Amino acid sequence: MVAPPKAPLQAKTSSPLLADLPVALVLERGADQPLHAQLAEQLRAAALSGALPAGLQLPGSRTLAAELGMTRGVVAGAYAELVADGTLEATVGRGTYVSAGAAQLRAKQTRAADEGAPGWFVAPAPAPVDGLMHAGGIHFRAGVATTATLDTRAWRQAWAAAARADVAGDYGHPAGEPEFRAALAAFVGRSRGLGADAERVLVTAGSLQALNLVLSLLPPRSNVLFEATGYRAARQAILDAGHLLIPLEQDADGPVITLDTPPARLAYVTPSHSFPLGGRMSVPRRLALLEWAAKHDALIVEDDYDGEFRYGAPPLPTLASLDPRSNRVIYLGTLSKVLTPGLRTGFLIGPPALMPTLIRARTLLDSGHPLPVQHALLHLLRTGEVDRHIRRTRRWHAGVRAVLTQVLEPLAPRATLGGIEAGLHVCLFLAPPLEAREVAAELARRGVYVSTLESYTFAGAVPNALLLGYGGLTMHAAEAGAREIVQVISGKR
């Protein structure tokens, strides 16, 4: 039965699970706030206040939807949002629980109030990023690049050239210096086959800043398609901006795009090397995504975070190069994986009509990128050192990848590698009864540190896999770590 506008929807009392909930759920149809957002807000407030204690199991989405007289998608959407921000935890086969982190966050808020923070201040959960690596052990850390291939002489020459540049008495262009933007456009044309004018390039402090600039274009509370197992920092940036996530299912060919894919304002994808699953988005899927964007008047963010690194596989065209006229794609590139994350330099290539607004957002954020950094990188690009460095680094990573493949492939079918054609990480998919969390814990006891995919997944079943980032490893370290993985999975002691 459909309730009249503004009529409250109250949970029935026939279900013992709902009867045991210590909070009342009251939702209003026809309100400005969507039903799933109302439900998420009430459950989050109850968890943070302690009304829903840590460890409490919530009703299943089907049960709660039936009791509230709404579709299951409303409850599933609310649960997905709360799992993504850490309020709830969901485990396949066990159900959905109030996270222990919610109680910890409440304690932090209490301490913040005691320490003089304003009463209205609510401390967010910690950013979903890895901390600094501790010394010792072998770290299969995703997002780390090697500096072993860096030509230190060329590196010093670049910074010497930057030091010889005139010292400006004013801010630079908020989009980046024209010569640097032109050099980046030429670089992307050489390395990724994407033709773009310098006027379409905006220099950023990495891909996350670029994404946040794009998110500022969207109307409030916009729907955003996002890979169900994807880049967790990007996912949190979308949530922090107040937008709503719609999960995209994935398979070996990347995100699944069908006639039933729902409308949204934006889709965020990593087509060159899915993060973290590692697959490459097929050309038919890329074309289907472009058709979806045209149909729903949407934008696409193409995060090409490690597109320069391919091993024995032909390069696939970027989404942006497949979309030369409709201007639906905003391409994100970075020099963090190419050179070093310490440079904090990336760029976006956007549609001409959106560039003034994106530049305005960068102006109000921090007025633009540091000029000495731009001058040094311009020198490296103009002298061809970036291209030479990529060739050296690609050979280095190919050697590390070859060692990993050689040691780990014999584990099949108990464990199989995925995402080995490109990028700086692979996934090792485990077959039952192996459990990724248990394997990772045993490896940590041996001084080998890997990640599972739990924190990367916000909808659907968590892939039973280990994430093995090898960008910062030598061949010797990768081989030693891989042999420990083999021993643990094979049950050797």
Image (cartoon, helix red, strand yellow):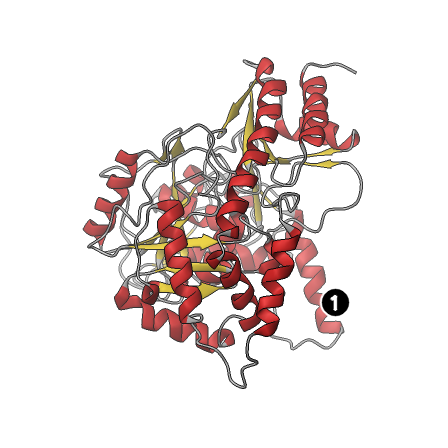
Rendered residue at 78%/33% (across/down) = 447
Determine the image quadrant of residue 274: top left
In this picture, residue 455 sits left or right of residue 487: left
Residue type at mark 1? Arg
In this picture, residue 42 sits left or right of residue 147: left
Rendered residue at 37%/66% (across/down) = 220
Residue 271 x, y percent position in the rendering: 39, 41
Determine the image quadrant of residue 26: bottom left
For the C terminus, the image quarter is top right
In this picture, residue 30 sits left or right of residue 93: left
In this picture, residue 408 sits left or right of residue 81: right
Taking the view exactly as shown, the residue that stands out farthest to the bottom is: 169
Residue 124 appears in view: no
Residue 276 x, y percent position in the rendering: 51, 38
Residue 151 x, y percent position in the rendering: 62, 49
Depicted 65 relative to depicted 483: above or below = below
Depicted 436 relative to depicted 350: above or below = above
- Nearer to me, 240 or 80: 240
Counting every numbered tag in the picture gives 1
- Nearer to me, 447 or 193: 193
Residue 390 x, y percent position in the rendering: 51, 44
SS for dot 1: helix
Residue 3 appears in view: yes
- Nearer to me, 31 or 148: 148
Rendered residue at 65%/54% (across/down) = 153
Depicted 60 relative to depicted 167: above or below = above
Determine the image quadrant of residue 116: bottom right
Which class describes the residues within 10 Å of circle 1: few (<14), some (14-19), or many (20+)?
few
Mark 1, residue position: 111
